[in-house]
Image (cartoon, grey):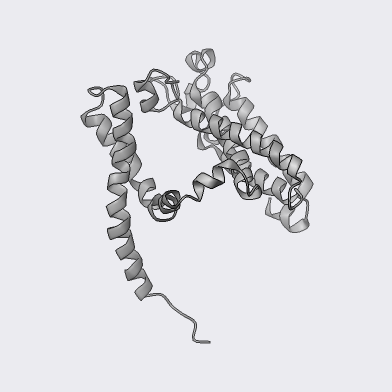
Amino acid sequence: MLVALFKGWIKPLTWMIAIAIVAIAVVRAGFIPGLVSGPIVAICAQRPDSLMVGMLAALLSARVADPIAPTTARRWSKIGMVAVVLSVLSVFASTTIAAKIGIHIPYLPKQPYTRAHVFNSEAYLSKWFWFKWGSTLASVTMGITTFCIFRLPNFPLNRWLTNRRMVYVGGVLSYALYLVHTPVQYLIEQTVGGHLPGVLDFALKMALPFAVAIPMATVVEKKAMEIKNRFSVTSTH
């Protein structure tokens, strides 16, 4: 891939990435039973196509004229908003929060299955589990959304993302929130999970990670950055 970039083989590289994304989606969806074995299991499970979608979006963006024509921009804006909705729904569909409100789609068949055998099991092939389509849909729609955010100044989502509170979440809280959201939500599930109404359970799992991340970011992370800066090396030239 690096060789292709250095050689300027952009079109062949773009087609290669696109074909790889489609191939992984087809295999993961179970359209070719028996194919998922050995290293292909790792390819399906580790989701390298998510990275490929980002690369493909960047390559295609580089080939789109700047600025984008108004008519084309409006068309892409509509496509982008549809992608936003589908991205949110696809990510949300297999969560325990979704299960609380009755719209849960199982991620994979329940045990006993090892990861190496689950993709060829009758249970996996007979039902439309989230893993068959969710990873692909979430990656593709996020790629489209990212393209629209960066290339369309008037994209509706940009007005929301540039809001002062969203800038704070993305710029200050993002790393702390990334670190704490899973353990905090797991702790909620293990302590009061199943004992709260669905809406309250959802609200708690959304709010408590922020409540933990805010002091973590403003006290721990900020202090760590101050300590790091003491040892930073600046050029004397």
Residue 169 visible in the snapshot: yes
Residue under the point 66% across and 49% down: 151
Question: Which of these two is toward me, 62 or 135?
Answer: 62
Question: Which of these two is toward me, 51 or 90?
Answer: 90
Residue 108 located left or right of residue 83: left
Question: Which of these two is toward me, 5 or 55?
Answer: 55
**Rendering quarter of residue 78:** top right
Residue 38 visible in the snapshot: no
Residue under the point 74% across and 53% down: 66
**Rendering quarter of residue 207:** top left
Q: Position of residue 182 (x, y in %)?
A: 34, 39
Examine the rendered structure and indicate whether residue 32 appears above or below residue 215: above
Q: Position of residue 42 (x, y in %)?
A: 52, 35
Residue under the point 70% across and 48% down: 61
Q: Position of residue 25 (x, y in %)?
A: 61, 29
Examine the rendered structure and indicate whether residue 225 appears above or below residue 201: below
Residue 99 located left or right of residue 1: left
Question: Which of these two is toward me, 172 or 45?
Answer: 172
Examine the rendered structure and indicate whether residue 54 appears above or below residue 223: above
**Rendering quarter of residue 219:** bottom left
Q: Position of residue 175 (x, y in %)?
A: 40, 52
